[in-house]
Image (cartoon, helix red, strand yellow):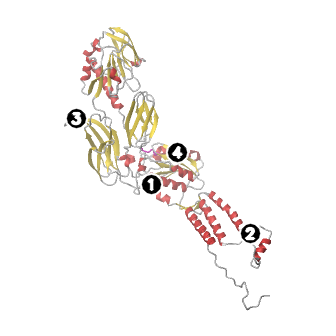
């Protein structure tokens, strides 16, 4: 940019087109080689004869209108390629970091129908065009995680092309992390001076103190206008009992908040996934800034456990991602317990049947590998040690000699006496085994001393044989060959085993994730690969190890469907929600001062009006001149009028 003149060439390399001036002028000074033609007289061709007699291949340059038009058009085209621009203001700094907000609030729709991120891309492009000549810039994406989209570069075209890679998400943003990343990119240039941060955002930041830690000057370019928005900021789904019918019911507790400046009447609706018919609905009236709970309940049908549920607000508003929240029908209150064989130990069956929240089922030992077994059921096996069985926790009673899980079942012990037990283990809490007498038991050899739960002088009597993702308890004797069932400690032991299995069942149900964060999906131990389908239909394959598949990121709110294949095929459904009060508040907040001073704020429109690109006007003028040149050359010539007659008139004297 020339000193004192608000004019600059954004691409000076375009001036190379001026080198075509010399070839153009040569075309007008080179003599044309004329063909030989026989004529009746050379009187009219005297000038041409003199020209042919000259030895030089060049002729005197005669300024003609086509030549002038072509020279001016060539100059205008050269200037157009060099992208001349005038500005009313500019972005100061030789090294600038441009931070673009891509958090959930940037997906809000403006009155013109475009998203705030689309406006942010335009504003970032205007920032690039407003940089000083030769200035370098780096672009940083500020989403849930900070990413460097384009490294430090002075090429405006490459920088603007990198803006197309930016996409909005349904995640809560972390502007402080993006500011730190941008500052790290500028750190090598701070000593030189001229390092500066430019943040393009709507100002609706989840971390309002993000700018306070910056040691560099910050210029904030605000995009977006104030819009009305209401949101679901919390969702909890639980089982309960209808007080009137005493039937089991599912309750969805939704917290709704109005972030707008006007009172709103909303409908909160609960429905199943892929079903349009609502299960429950209610109207809620909210004053500006008010929040209120909405409770929606329904009686689940048999087999509804795990079915997806959607709670949504209507009518929709500017930000669609917070108008819906997703969950699943929780497991029933009763824990399924499968005994094998069905008519096994009567003492164990009586203890399990006394729990009103236990659904006692029976199966044969051969039928334990069937597909009809609930994946979260507690298995109680008497007189055997099965391997590779589905289900949840496992209780094995009186196993035969051999390997049983991580424990080796050894020789028979006669009349062992209990000497100690692991009081800290949840299966043995609140009980005492004093006075318990056994007729016979098998010695257990667990894989570690910590796995020995109950011990005698002769060896371990009860051991932990758990594996990753499954708790297994091995009791090395028949409880009928002891006085243990006659003591309260036996009932407490069975109750503790059931409660531990119930807690594992509740924990094993896939919880609701949070957008933008990683998610741990539980899968069978033998599964090594999981195919995941996102709410947008995008599919990806992820690795699994030791019964866990880690999903790196949940970018969108909605349902995620995972399928896998091991010894048995299976699938899992889980969901992710935004439920962020700060992202749902689309009103710009007042920003604090930074360590380097106050935050300078510009609007998107102010920045767009600061730079005017004249390339299109110069190119249009050049095309107009070329069109005029073509018209002049191809116009119909005027008839030649001779002032001196070619032939003497009749009756006049012939010239001498």
Q: Mark 1 points at which residue?
A: 223
The verdict on residue 336 being magenta is no
Q: In this view, does 204 lie above or below 514?
A: below
Q: Distance between the residues labelled 2 and 3?
A: 110 Å
Residue 546: quarter of image: top left
Q: Which stretch appears magenta? A: 171-175
Whole-percent x, y for residue 529 in the image:
45, 32
Q: Do the residues labelled 1 and 3 touch (CB within 8 Å)?
A: no
Q: Which mark is residue 148?
A: 4
Q: How far apart are marks 2 and 4 (CA)?
A: 68 Å
User: Residue at (51%, 60%) from the top-left corner?
Assistant: 610
Q: Nearer the viewer, mark 2 or mark 3?
A: 2
- Whichever of labels 1 and 2 marks the residue nearer the N terminus, that label is 2
The majority secondary structure of the magenta stretch comes to loop
Q: In this view, does 310 lie above or below 73?
A: above
Q: In this view, does 32 lie to the left or right of 586?
A: right
Q: Mark 3 points at which residue?
A: 247
Q: Which of marks 2 and 4 is in front?
A: 2
Q: In this view, does 636 lie above or below 435?
A: below
- Whichever of labels 2 and 4 marks the residue nearer the N terminus, that label is 2
**In this orientation, does residue 548 appear?**
yes
Whole-percent x, y for residue 36 in the image:
75, 70
Q: How far apart are marks 3 and 4 (CA)?
A: 55 Å
Q: Do the residues labelled 1 and 2 touch (CB within 8 Å)?
A: no
- Whichever of labels 2 and 3 marks the residue nearer the N terminus, that label is 2
- Whichever of labels 3 and 4 marks the residue nearer the N terminus, that label is 4
Q: How far apart are marks 1 and 4 (CA)?
A: 21 Å
Q: In this view, does 184 lie to the left or right of 359?
A: right
Q: Name the residue under label 2.
A: 35
- Whichever of labels 1 and 4 marks the residue nearer the N terminus, that label is 4
């Amino acid at each position: 940019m020339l000193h004192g003149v608000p004019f600059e060439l954004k691409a000076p390399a375009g001036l190379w087109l001026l080198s075509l001036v010399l070839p153009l002028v040569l075309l007008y000074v080179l003599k044309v080689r004329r063909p030989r033609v026989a004529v009746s007289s050379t009187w009219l061709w005297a000038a041409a004869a003199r020209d042919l007699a000259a030895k030089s291949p060049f002729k005197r340059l005669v300024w003609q209108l086509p030549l002038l038009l072509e020279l001016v058009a060539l100059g205008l085209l050269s200037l157009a390629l060099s992208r001349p621009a005038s500005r009313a203001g500019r972005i100061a700094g030789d090294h600038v970091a441009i931070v673009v907000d891509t958090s959930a609030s940037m997906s809000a729709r403006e009155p013109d129908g475009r998203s705030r991120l689309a406006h942010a891309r335009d504003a970032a492009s205007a920032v690039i065009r407003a940089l000083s000549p030769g200035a370098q810039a780096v672009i940083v994406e500020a989403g849930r995680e900070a990413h460097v989209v384009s490294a430090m570069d002075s090429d405006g075209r490459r920088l603007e092309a990198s803006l197309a890679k930016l996409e909005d998400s349904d995640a809560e943003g972390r502007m402080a992390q993006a500011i730190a990343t941008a500052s790290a990119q500028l750190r090598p240039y701070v000593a030189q001076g001229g390092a500066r941060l430019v943040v393009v955002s709507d100002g609706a930041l989840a971390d309002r103190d993000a700018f306070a830690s910056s040691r560099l000057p910050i210029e904030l370019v605000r995009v977006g206008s104030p819009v009305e928005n209401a949101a679901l900021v919390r969702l909890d789904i639980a089982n309960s009992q209808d007080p009137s019918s005493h039937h089991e019911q599912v309750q969805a507790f939704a917290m709704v908040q109005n972030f707008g400046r006007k009172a709103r009447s909303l409908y909160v609706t609960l429905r199943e996934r892929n079903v349009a018919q609502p299960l429950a609905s209610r109207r809620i009236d909210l004053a500006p800034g008010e929040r209120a709970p909405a409770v929606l309940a329904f009686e689940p049908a048999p087999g509804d456990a795990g079915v997806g549920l959607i709670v949504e607000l209507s009518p929709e508003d500017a930000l669609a991602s917070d108008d819906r929240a997703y969950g699943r029908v929780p497991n029933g209150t009763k824990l399924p317990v499968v005994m094998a064989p069905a008519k096994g130990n009567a003492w164990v069956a009586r203890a399990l049947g006394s729990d009103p929240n236990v659904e006692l089922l029976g199966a044969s030992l051969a039928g334990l590998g069937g597909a009809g077994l609930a994946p979260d059921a507690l298995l109680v096996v008497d007189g055997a040690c099965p391997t590779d069985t589905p289900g949840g926790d496992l209780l094995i009673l009186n196993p035969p000699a051999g390997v049983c899980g991580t424990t080796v079942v050894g020789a028979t012990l006669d009349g062992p006496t209990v000497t100690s037990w692991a009081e800290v283990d949840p299966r043995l809490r609140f009980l005492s085994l004093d006075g318990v007498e056994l007729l016979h038991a098998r010695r257990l050899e667990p894989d570690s001393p910590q796995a020995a739960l109950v011990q005698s002088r002769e060896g371990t009597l009860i051991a932990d044989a758990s594996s990753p993702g499954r708790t297994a308890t091995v009791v090395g004797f028949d409880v009928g060959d002891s006085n243990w069932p006659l003591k309260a400690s036996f009932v407490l032991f069975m109750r503790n085993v059931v409660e531990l299995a119930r807690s594992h069942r509740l924990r094993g149900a896939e919880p609701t994730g949070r957008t933008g964060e990683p998610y741990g999906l539980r899968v069978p131990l033998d599964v090594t690969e999981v195919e995941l389908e996102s709410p947008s239909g995008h599919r990806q394959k992820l690795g699994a190890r030791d019964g866990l598949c880690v999903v790196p990121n949940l970018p969108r709110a909605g349902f995620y469907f995972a399928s896998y294949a091991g010894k048995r095929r299976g699938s899992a459904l889980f969901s992710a929600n935004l439920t962020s009060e700060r992202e749902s508040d689309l009103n710009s907040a007042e920003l604090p001062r930074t360590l380097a001073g106050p935050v300078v704020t510009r609007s998107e429109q102010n920045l767009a009006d600061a730079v005017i690109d004249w390339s299109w006007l110069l190119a249009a003028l050049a095309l107009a001149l070329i069109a005029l040149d073509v018209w002049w050359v191809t116009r119909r010539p005027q008839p030649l009028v001779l002032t001196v007659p070619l032939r003497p008139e009749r009756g006049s004297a012939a010239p001498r």
